[in-house]
Image (spheres, rainbow, N blue to C red):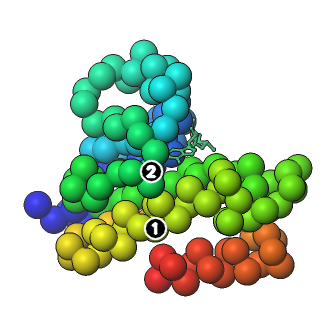
Amino acid sequence: MNGTSNKTVAEFFAGIGLMRIGLENAGWRIAFANDIDHDKWQMYKDHFGDTGEFVVDDIHKLKSSQVPTVALATASFPCNDLSLAGARHGLAGAQSSAFWGFVDILKTMKLERRQPPIVLLENVTGFLTSHNGQDFENALLALN
Ligand SMILES: C[S@@+](CC[C@H](N)C(=O)[O-])C[C@H]1O[C@@H](n2cnc3c(N)ncnc32)[C@H](O)[C@@H]1O
């Protein structure tokens, strides 16, 4: 099925599902969700029900075969290393480097000729200035 013809989403770093609430209100359907945190998955499940699309695992361990073909991939990746309130280790930091796990999944999906045509990143404003803008530039280059 062509993922562009339907409003389907693979939601990475799904947490308790706040992105999902917004997207569903806009007519999108969550085909896949992932987060590493079991407690957040519990809250997600309590709210949305267990309909089988949520995979609890480290994004670095996910296989592209677990991710269906979708029109949109979202990433609310950890902000700890990008925030102005943190130590600003950037995309190389222990938490925010999870972004590269997301990129790896997309790269594999591209090789499989089924990369999502739309990618949505959600993060703090400190992402724009991290390492004088180099992290943001590297992120855009990787996505391109
Ligand atoms: C900024 S929060 C996203 C919050 C989300 N938008 C929500 O509605 O709760 C980042 C999320 O990334 C998850 N996370 C951190 N490292 C991860 C990893 N290596 N693999 C998968 N998820 C990870 C955290 O558990 C957290 O829920």
Residue type beneath disc 2: Ile
In the image, taking residue 123 as reference, residue 89 lies left or right, namely: right
**Residue at the location (66% across, 51% down)?**
95
Give coordinates of residue 84: x percent, y percent. Answer: 87, 56
When asked about the image quadrant of residue 49, the answer is: top left
- CA gap, disc 2 to disc 1? 10 Å
Give coordinates of residue 74: x percent, y percent. Answer: 46, 55
Q: Secondary structure at mark 2?
A: helix
**Residue at the location (68% across, 74% down)?**
136
Above or below residue 86? Residue 108 is below
Residue type beneath disc 1: Val
Mark 2 CB within 8 Å of ligand 1? yes
Q: Nearer the viewer, residue 143 or 93?
A: 93
Q: Nearer the viewer, residue 28 or 100?
A: 100
Q: Is residue 59 visible?
A: yes
Q: Secondary structure at mark 1?
A: helix
Callout 1 environment at 10 Å: few (<14), some (14 to 19), or many (20+)? Answer: some
Q: Is residue 27 visible?
A: no
Residue wearing tag 1: 103
On-image quarter of the N terminus: bottom left
Give coordinates of residue 80: x percent, y percent. Answer: 74, 49
In the image, taking residue 123 as reference, residue 9 lies left or right, namely: left
Label annotation for residue 59: 2
Above or below residue 25? Residue 89 is below
**Residue at the location (81% across, 75% down)?**
131
Q: Nearer the viewer, residue 18 or 62?
A: 62
Label annotation for residue 43: none
* Ligand 1 position by quadrant: top right
